[in-house]
C-alpha cells in the first residue's frame, strides 16, 4: 500500500513538472492589432484579474475586444487558505514546501480556466517570487523582484500591440505591496513608449453602491508616477447590469464563475457576490486625451448591446 502511494505521488509530481515545462516553452502568440479595443491587465497574482471580471467579459465577449493578462508573481505564496484544494489536487498545499513547488503550476491552470470564462486572449507569466505579505512596494521592487527585467518585458509587450488601455490595481499604501509594485512597473513601462503609442493606464478597485466612505486614492509613497489624477472621475462598471432581457442574469454571475475556478485559493471564494461595482480612476501620468478616452470607453461599456 505504501509503495502504491509512493508511485502515485511520483506520478503526480511528473504530471505537474510536465505541465510546468509546457508553460515554460509555449510562446504567447501576439497579434499586431491596430483596430478594435485592446486592453492589457497587469496584475501581481494569478487571481487578481477577478477584480475586473465583469469588464473583461464585456470587452472580450460582447464588444469583440482583446484582453491580455500579464501576471508578475508566481503565486507560490498563496498556500495559507488552500486546505479545501488539497483533496482536489492530492497534495498537501498548506505545507509551504509543497506549495512552493506545485502552486505556481496549479494557479496558472486555474487562472487560464477562469480566463476562458471571461475571454482573456494571451497570458504573460513573469514568475517573480510571491514571497510574503507586505505593504512596502519599495521592498518588493528593490529586493524581491527583478524590477528591471519585468519593466523591460512589459515595454516589449506594450510595444508589440497597440493597447488602448492598461488596467492595474489601485496602488494604495494600504494594499499588498505586490499590487503596488505591479502597478508602478506597468506605469513605468507605459511611460517609455512614444506618446502616440502610450495606453491609458487605469487604477481599479472593487466596491459597492452602498459604500458611504470614498475610496482612498492615496498611492505608494515615493513613486510620483503612481499618483491618481486630481479630481479624476470615478468610472464604474456595474456588475448588476442585466445580461439578458429578463434582467435576472447579471455580470455578477460571470464574476462568480471566474472566482470559482481559483480552487486553490479558498479565501477567494468568500468574494462571491461581495462587490457590485468595478471602479476605475485615471493616473496623473497618463498621456494627453486620457480623460476623453476613458469616458468614451465607459460610455461604450454601459451602452445597450443593440448599439454595437
Image: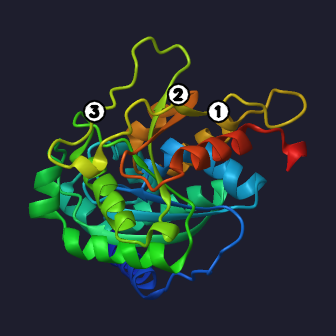
The answer to whether 126 appears left or right of 240 in the picture is left
Find numbered disc 2 in the image and state the secondary structure of the residue it sits on: loop
Disc 3 target residue: 218
Element on which disc 3 rests: loop
Mark 2 or mark 3, whichever is nearer to me: 3
Residue name at image x 78 percent, y 39 percent: 303
Residue 207: x, y in percent? Answer: 48, 27
Q: Are marks 1 and 2 in contact (CB under 8 Å)?
A: yes
87 relative to 164, above or below: above
Inter-mark Cα distance, 1 to 3? 25 Å
Q: Are marks 2 and 3 in contact (CB under 8 Å)?
A: no
User: Between disc 1 and disc 3, whose residue precedes?
Assistant: 3
> Which one is in front, 198 or 247?
198
What is the x, y in percent for residue 103? 33, 62
Q: Is residue 161 above or below residue 252?
A: below
- At a point 62% along the width and 45% down the height, the residue shown is 55
Q: Out of 304 and 254, give the one closest to the viewer.
A: 304
Instruction: Give the class, few, some or many, for how many residues have Cα within 10 Å of label 3's Cα (few <14, many ≥20).
Output: some
Q: Residues within 10 Å of mark 1 (few under 14, many from 20)?
A: many
Residue 71 placement: quadrant: bottom left
Residue on which disc 1 sits: 239
Does dot 1 land on a helix, a strand or a loop?
A: loop
Which residue is disc 2 drawn over? 275
* Crowding at mark 2 (Cα within 10 Å: few <14, some 14-19, many 20+): some
Q: Earlier in the sequence, mark 2 or mark 3?
A: 3
Q: In the picture, which quadrant includes the N terminus? A: bottom left
Earlier in the chain: of badge 1 and badge 2, it is 1
Cα separation between marks 1 and 2: 8 Å
Q: Is residue 95 visible?
A: yes
- Residue placed most toward the observer, 289 or 165: 289
> Vertical placement of 250 versus 53: above or below?
above
Image quadrant in which you'd find residue 70:
bottom left
Amino acid at each position: 500500500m505504501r509503495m502504491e502511494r509512493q508511485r502515485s505521488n511520483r506520478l503526480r509530481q511528473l504530471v505537474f513538472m510536465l505541465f510546468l515545462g509546457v508553460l515554460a516553452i509555449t510562446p504567447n502568440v501576439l497579434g499586431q492589432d491596430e483596430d478594435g479595443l485592446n486592453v492589457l491587465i497587469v496584475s501581481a497574482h494569478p487571481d487578481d484579474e477577478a477584480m475586473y471580471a465583469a469588464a473583461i467579459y464585456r470587452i472580450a465577449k460582447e464588444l469583440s475586444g482583446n484582453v491580455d493578462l500579464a501576471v508578475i508573481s508566481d503565486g507560490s505564496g498563496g498556500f495559507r487558505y488552500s486546505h479545501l484544494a488539497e483533496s482536489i489536487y492530492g497534495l498537501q498545499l498548506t505545507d509551504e514546501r509543497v506549495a512552493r513547488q506545485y502552486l505556481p503550476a496549479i494557479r496558472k491552470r486555474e487562472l487560464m480556466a477562469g480566463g476562458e470564462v471571461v475571454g482573456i486572449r494571451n497570458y504573460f507569466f513573469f514568475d517573480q517570487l510571491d514571497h510574503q505579505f507586505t505593504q512596502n512596494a519599495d521592498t518588493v521592487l528593490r529586493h524581491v523582484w527583478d524590477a528591471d527585467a519585468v519593466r523591460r518585458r512589459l515595454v516589449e509587450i506594450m510595444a508589440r500591440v497597440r493597447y488602448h488601455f492598461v488596467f492595474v490595481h489601485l496602488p494604495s499604501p494600504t494594499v499588498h505591496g505586490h499590487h503596488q509594485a505591479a502597478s508602478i512597473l506597468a506605469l513605468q513601462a507605459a511611460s517609455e513608449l512614444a506618446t502616440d503609442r502610450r495606453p491609458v493606464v487605469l487604477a481599479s478597485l472593487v466596491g459597492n453602491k452602498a459604500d458611504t466612505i470614498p475610496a482612498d486614492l492615496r498611492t505608494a509613497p515615493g513613486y510620483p508616477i503612481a499618483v491618481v489624477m486630481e479630481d479624476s472621475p470615478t468610472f464604474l462598471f456595474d456588475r448588476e447590469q442585466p445580461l439578458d432581457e429578463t434582467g435576472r442574469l447579471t455580470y455578477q454571475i460571470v464574476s462568480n464563475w471566474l472566482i470559482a475556478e481559483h480552487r486553490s485559493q479558498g479565501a477567494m471564494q468568500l468574494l462571491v457576490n461581495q462587490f457590485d461595482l468595478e471602479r476605475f480612476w485615471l493616473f496623473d501620468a497618463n498621456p494627453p486625451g486620457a480623460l476623453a478616452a476613458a469616458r468614451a470607453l465607459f460610455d461604450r461599456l454601459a451602452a445597450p448591446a443593440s448599439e454595437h
